[in-house]
Image (cartoon, rainbow, N blue to C red):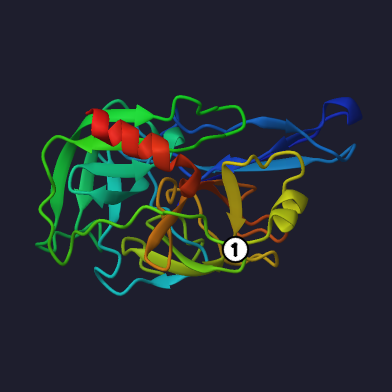
Amino acid sequence: MTTYLFKVNFTEMETPYIVNQKSCSNLRKCQLLSLYHAHRQGQSAIMRCLVFLVLLGAAFAEDDKIVGGYECQPYSQPHQVSLNSGYHFCGGSLVNENWVVSAAHCYKSRVEVHMGEHNIRVTEGHEQFITSSRVIKHPRYSSYNIDNDIMLIKLSKPATLNQYVQPVALPTSCASAGTRCTVSGWGNTMSSTADRNKLQCLQIPILSDRDCDKAYPGMITDAMFCAGYMEGGKDSCQGDSGGPVVCNGVLQGVVSWGYGCAEAGHPGVYAKVCLFNDWLEQTMASY
């Protein structure tokens, strides 16, 4: 694993707040996200970007996973997909046989969607690999503050639904603070013991708007929510981006961004899927 750690010092008037998107596909696409003006003066900012290094090629690749979680029961998350462009770079959720929901910051004009996966480095016999025919970012997605971080991927042919590949329900209402949810992905575990290729799961509670705003003052929009643990130690991380937050069988969140991974006082931030129901339904009906 290759981790790049940057420490940048700024003057009192130009102190930025630097956060990480939770995907990092290669050096060109690895965005150090956005600079935010901090509310405290004279602080140093630390930013990390885990880049994917692939030998014999100019691409950077790395196996990144959930931090502080556990290996999912194989095929217990049949809606979970891997977005692939020669390597896993983001997650996503199958919402019907033709469409996948992911994060807008994971956008590539063409992707291959891998379904029915558990160990992404082993052929297990249940996989379906289907290319995209359309990739549609939310029209109001902002790469500056990562607002409206959601996108739809239309499959070039319908997925075959079975016990290994199943859609997850879209929400009819928003989940409340305290609701316990499952986040899953093949993102950074920051662990030397976890199998780096098997789908990881983590149980996380949705946090109150007050706690979320306290963790990220001035940075949380109506289209975001926080989930996880204020004490740190458990979180989604780089490579999990676009993946599902499922609460009571319903897709309530999309892995989006955060300050580092599993750091105390900085829980994960997720796109609030319930606010996008109209856009999702209208877009899927239009293509």
SS label for mark 1: loop
Q: Which residue is mark 1?
A: 228
Along the viewing direction, whichever of 1 and 234 lies nearer the viewer: 234
Residue 230 drawn above or below residue 81: below
Residue 47 drawn above or below residue 80: above
Q: Residues within 10 Å of mark 1 (few under 14, many from 20)?
A: many
**Which residue sits at x=23%, y=57%?**
121
**Which residue sits at x=21%, y=59%?**
166
**Which residue sits at x=52%, y=32%?**
31
Residue 134 lies in what quarter of the image? Answer: top left
Where is residue 129? Give x, y as percent: 15, 46
Residue 278 drawn above or below residue 233: above
**Which residue sits at x=34%, y=44%?**
101
Along the viewing direction, whichever of 243 and 67 lies nearer the viewer: 243
**Amino acid type of disc 1?**
Gly
Where is residue 188? Give x, y as percent: 46, 56
Q: Does the image show residue 255? A: no
Along the viewing direction, whichever of 37 and 163 lies nearer the viewer: 163
Q: Is residue 48 left or right of residue 210?
A: left
